[in-house]
Image: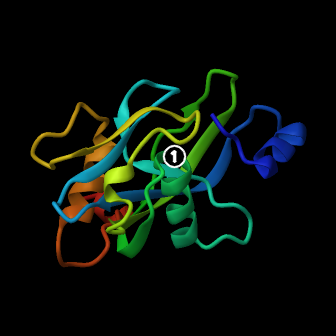
Amino acid sequence: MATPEFIRDLRLSAGHQLLYLPGVSAVVFDDEGRVLLGRRADTGLWSVIGGIPEPGEQPADCAVREVFEETNVRCVPERVALVHGVEKPVTYPNGDVCQFMDITFRCRATAESAGRARVNDDESLEVGWFRTDALPEMKPFALLRIEQAAAEEGPAWFLSSADAHS
């Protein structure tokens, strides 16, 4: 997977220990209401598009960049759909451990690029558009992001410690 340069630099001193990092996810819809998904090269599973913002990069700009880098689709962020501190750390095959604070954006594909989805880097095995009632098998966190982004109205979803204790 493409690890940002600043993370590689951090790993020189931090080793494999847990890093708590910002993450951005983009749930991109086309004019037909289909959602853009990528089948990840690291796990083989379908998921929403996402990545890590570069230092100083705005989260919405990161979402747009990641979508284009991974799928060749241009998109416009419409709103924040979800803010989520992912509960469990991820251990990568090389032993690096990360935990993410994710901001998910609902995005709209631009008219000229909606039909041009393709694998655009080495992070995905496949990319494609899916109807929300015909999604491939995905992890629950990806389904939650799609569900929240598909809601036409309402505030961004978040979990508070008060919710966890009720």
Residue furthest to the right: 13
Please indicate whether residue 104 sits to the left or right of residue 10 in the image.
left
Helix, strand or loop for disc 1: helix
What x and y, as percent, mark residue 55?
74, 65
Q: Is residue 101 visible?
A: no
Image quadrant for the C terminus? bottom left
Query: As rendered, which of 108 and 100 lies closer to the eye?
Result: 108
- Please name the residue shown 69% across and 22% down the image: 94
Please indicate whether residue 154 sits to the left or right of residue 120 in the image.
left
- Please name the residue shown 53% across and 42% down the image: 120
Q: Label 1 crowding class (10 Å Cα cut-off): few <14, some 14-19, many 20+?
A: many
Image quadrant for the N terminus? top right
Question: Label 1 belongs to which residue?
Answer: 70
Query: As rendered, which of 121 and 37 lies closer to the eye?
Result: 121
- Please name the residue shown 63% across and 53% down the image: 21
Q: Is residue 154 visible?
A: yes
Query: As rendered, which of 102 and 34 lies closer to the eye?
Result: 34
Query: As rendered, which of 141 and 137 lies closer to the eye?
Result: 137
Amino acid under label 1? Glu
Q: Is 55 situated above or below 137?
A: below
Q: Is 56 situated above or below 18?
A: below
Q: Quadrant of residue 82?
A: bottom left
What x and y, as percent, mark residue 131?
15, 48
Residue furthest to the left: 133
Q: Is 110 situated above or below 101?
A: below
- Please name the residue shown 57% across and 45% down the image: 99
What x and y, as percent, mark residue 83?
41, 65
What x and y, as percent, mark residue 68?
51, 56
